[in-house]
Image (tube, helix red, strand yellow):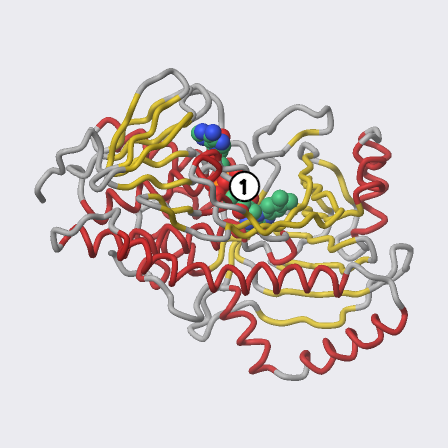
Amino acid sequence: MTRLVHDFDIIISGRSFVGHAQAVALVDALGPDFRIALLDRTSATVGAALDGAVDQHGNAYPQGGRAFAISAGSQRMLEVLGLWSEVRDEAHPVRKIVLTDSELGAGVRRHVMSYDNTLDDHAPASFILQSDILEAALRRRVGMLQAAGAVTVINDASPKSIATDAFSTTTTLNDGTEIKAPLAIAADGRRSQLRKLVGIKLTSWSHNQIGIVTQVRHSRPHDGRAIQHFLPSGPFAILPLPGERSCVTWSEAADNAQRILAMTDAEFLEEVKLRFGAELGVLELVGPRQSWPLETHVARSFVADRLALVGDAARGVHPIAGQGLNLGLRDVAALTEVVAEAVRVGLDPGAGDTLAAYQQWRRFDSVISTTAFDGLNRLFSNDGVLLRAARDAGMGLLDRMPWAKQQLVNTAAGMSGDVPKLLRGEAV
Ligand SMILES: Cc1cc2nc3c(=O)[nH]c(=O)nc-3n(C[C@H](O)[C@H](O)[C@H](O)COP(=O)(O)OP(=O)(O)OC[C@H]3O[C@@H](n4cnc5c(N)ncnc54)[C@H](O)[C@@H]3O)c2cc1C
């Protein structure tokens, strides 16, 4: 490949899950001569931070504790990129999904729908993986790419301004350094600085809920079941991890969440037990408590002159379906495909046509997802007797329609619509 004349071929701002995955996918597709700058606003030793994440003491981002539902599509992508073998032993397959709908104090959490979480070829449709394990694997790989000269990680770097001409975009960092490339990618999370600098506005709203995450060990086996209790103040998900542990991802009405987060560990465990149900036996807290304000947003454009948004910089969804990271990885797969196609035929990776193809592929799908997850949350975070009767009747009907449940599984697995190559398990 002919080396482009700019300082870098691509600048990626944001060194979390999506930014790391974007760097790895581009080098995998275009080879180590393709030079990538990866901007990290922290120093080398600090881990990735989801914007707004705090522990129970209000400190920014504690490591571990949190877990992702990794869809089969994302898993195939990690496999193609050679990352899955590094995390596979720690990823627990989700074999069955159980949904319940009940009041907070109900003695029994009645199942309203349950289904096998497998694809047509019987492979699991999703896995639960701790965020710190995924992060460590991504960091190791980017470290190797750094050693090979393909990726230059710039620490303590935050974009201060961005200027674009006919051939390149120049990002000026907080220390005055200027870096130049034909394309910049904003993977800098929901408060994206690059997005702000180019003036892309958001459509956003708050759910008036707080996401709480913790880990528990239980005396009975989960058998790979993921359980979602729909409760009046928000969904409470129990996600199976190896070693008879589960990650709890819980959306709670904001005022009640503040009260719960201020509790001692013993009091907090009682609140978890009140929601958890008795199916998994005796519970013990084994992870830190973390919380996030829950908001939904979609960028009004996913591209600007020589700039593309990926991950939470492009859109942030309610965690009800555990899809935020999966959508971000789908962005990475789609953007890698359009950029690689352009570069291979000697075209400019930051040209308007290339970015328009990316936007067309990803933005409509994102608007649909954000609206669907928001609608689900509104439908279920509600205690109206009539509404509960109607939704339970609807779920009961769906529960008797195996083909419809299989469609749900395929969609959540990232296997529906125009699926990018990486999510199909094919190299770009
Ligand atoms: C409670 C909860 C549960 C969730 N569960 C799941 C789940 O089960 N499955 C799933 O798929 N998703 C889940 N998500 C969503 C998922 O966490 C996010 O979608 C994902 O972390 C987004 O990754 P990202 O890399 O785009 O952004 P982030 O993880 O927010 O990373 C952004 C990065 O950009 C950096 N940055 C920010 N500003 C600058 C700057 N000015 N300069 C340079 N760098 C900057 C930050 O330091 C950070 O490293 C959940 C979210 C919540 C809140």
> Please, which residue is most extreme toward the front here?
165
| Coordinates of residue 198 in the picture (x, y in percent) | 42, 39
Looking at the image, which residue is at 48% across and 44% down? 313
**120 and 41: which one is in front?**
41
Q: Is residue 179 above or below residue 33?
A: above
Amino acid type at mark 1: Arg
Asked whether residue 80 appears in the rendered view, the answer is yes
> Please, which residue is most extreme toward the top here?
175
Asked whether residue 245 appears in the rendered view, the answer is no
Is 219 on the left-hand or right-hand side of 336? right
What residue is pinned by disc 1? 190
Tell me the element at label 1. Answer: loop
**Mark 1 Cβ inside 8 Å of ligand 1:** yes
Looking at the image, which residue is at 77% across and 74% down? 391
Is 27 on the left-hand or right-hand side of 231? left
Q: Is residue 151 above or below residue 245?
A: above
Is 127 on the left-hand or right-hand side of 386? left
Looking at the image, which residue is at 69% across and 47% down? 206
| Coordinates of residue 277 in the picture (x, y in percent) | 81, 55
| Coordinates of residue 245 in the picture (x, y in percent) | 65, 45
| Coordinates of residue 307 in the picture (x, y in percent) | 35, 44
